[in-house]
Image (cartoon, helix red, strand yellow):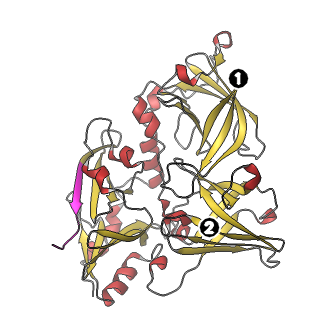
Amino acid sequence: MLNLSCQEVCFVSVKRYFFFPLILLLALLTSCRGSDVSEKTDEGFREDRAVVLDPAAWPASAWGTIPWGGGVELQVFESGETRLIRDHRVYWLRPEGDRFILESRLYRTLHDETPALVFPVGEARVLTDGDLCRVEILSDPIHAFAEGKKTVLLKRSTSDSLEDMNRFIDFYPVSSIPHAQPNTRWSYSNAPERKEELDFISDENGSVTGFCRIEGETVACEMLIGHHSFFWDFALVRQDAHSVEDVLLYGSKQYTGNRDDRLYFTVTACYDPLGLVGETLPLTLTKHTTDELEEQNWLGMNYYELMFRMEREGWLAEPVILYDHDYASFYRLRRGEQTLLLMPDRAFESPYTELFVQGYALYERRKLLTWGGLRPFDHSLADSYVPMAGNWFSYTVQSHGNIDANYSTFFLDDCRVAAVEFDLFGLWEEHNFMILDLYAGD
């Protein structure tokens, strides 16, 4: 039996009650310059000085509204690449004469660096007078910008460019999407007619492929996902898609914080050219689960129930405590030469009283065998990381890791864990970087 003290069993009552609610924490992490951006940006635009934005003339610059709760931001990188963050989603700007084509970059996995499909979603005009930027949505063929104003004024930020450019790295716990749940099956049927069906499998890397049945025709397809936003862009496309004609469904996945997010994948569609979902919007895919003690069932399971069942199979569970806290950050389970790391999260709907599994990593000695929730990071990134002002580890791996209380943890691919504390009095800056070796063998 797993021998847990009352303090360990109830650590969850302490764990996040002194921890800001997730939404507030996300706001703090993404809104580090409220004093730099005026809340009123609807006045003062100088039409006589306005010119079309030239990204080459504004490297490492950003304009925005107050980002609390999801504002609008325009960011120009050193390379000249430009992105618009609006309605919690990311769109990239491609110059086209005196206008810009707005594009969504979609990937096969959350870890791919090259998009599988670049999907045009609209057209915009961007003018600047040097201090303010005016962004006008000129066309919206797939209703991606149905919410909010078509024209917004943004004020130039004076904060550190690195802070601006890295703020929108993958944010919410990614364990709520099929791409973060390897070796799982997901399906959808339009009951009672069952005219349209979808069936997908997420492979060991998180690539999601399968088929959809449209009026009796079976079409091979795959699910693509976006990066670096509050909500994920999503597209159901034909296998090896090359253009907009291959897009069968487009929309966004929103994170709710509920435990069931690991069992259901719900997409709010804005583009459904074939009527695949029709009046049953949004689309919800259901994960196939059983009562068996198999890895595809772990995410979303009650945290202590899984450890109890694993102990009956011969695993030894022990808490891992970081930064001298009085509760377990996560658990390490060992059996023979295998090590299993289990990361908890708290279910919002419980209300906020039940722990469930939000991530795991299974190793054979130091070799990573499988994972779920958040893929362990390349250990060389941690070994070569040099903590210094402005050089956050989350920027290095392009993820905030597993956020808990006032620190984050990052599973590595060699049975080690990296962790950073947040400076509670320094706008949640990272400090106290550490690497913990969880391998107990020779």
Q: Label 2 vs label 1: CA separation?
A: 39 Å
In this view, 92 is above or below 171: above
Q: Is residue 10 left or right of residue 243?
A: left
Q: Is residue 259 left or right of residue 240?
A: left
Residue 150 appears in the picture as rendered:
no
SS at circle 1 = loop
Reply yes or no: does residue 440 show up in magenta.
yes
Q: How many circles with numbers are drawn on the protein? A: 2
Q: Which stretch appears magenta?
A: 433-442
In this view, 132 is above or below 406: above
- Residue 26, percent from left and from top: 45, 48
- Residue 206, percent from left and from top: 51, 64
Q: Is residue 4 left or right of residue 55?
A: left
The three-letter amino acid code for the residue at tag 2 is Thr
The three-letter amino acid code for the residue at tag 1 is Asp
Q: Which mark is residue 209?
A: 2
SS at circle 2 = strand
Mark 2 or mark 1, which is nearer to you? 2
| Along the viewing direction, whichever of 116 and 72 lies nearer the viewer | 116
Are there few (<14), some (14-19), or many (20+) residues within 10 Å of tag 1? few
- Residue 71, percent from left and from top: 57, 38
Residue that carries the numbered disc 1 in the rendered image: 98
Are there few (<14), some (14-19), or many (20+) residues within 10 Å of tag 2? many
**Which of marks 1 and 2 precedes in the sequence?**
1
Reply yes or no: does residue 78 show up in magenta.
no
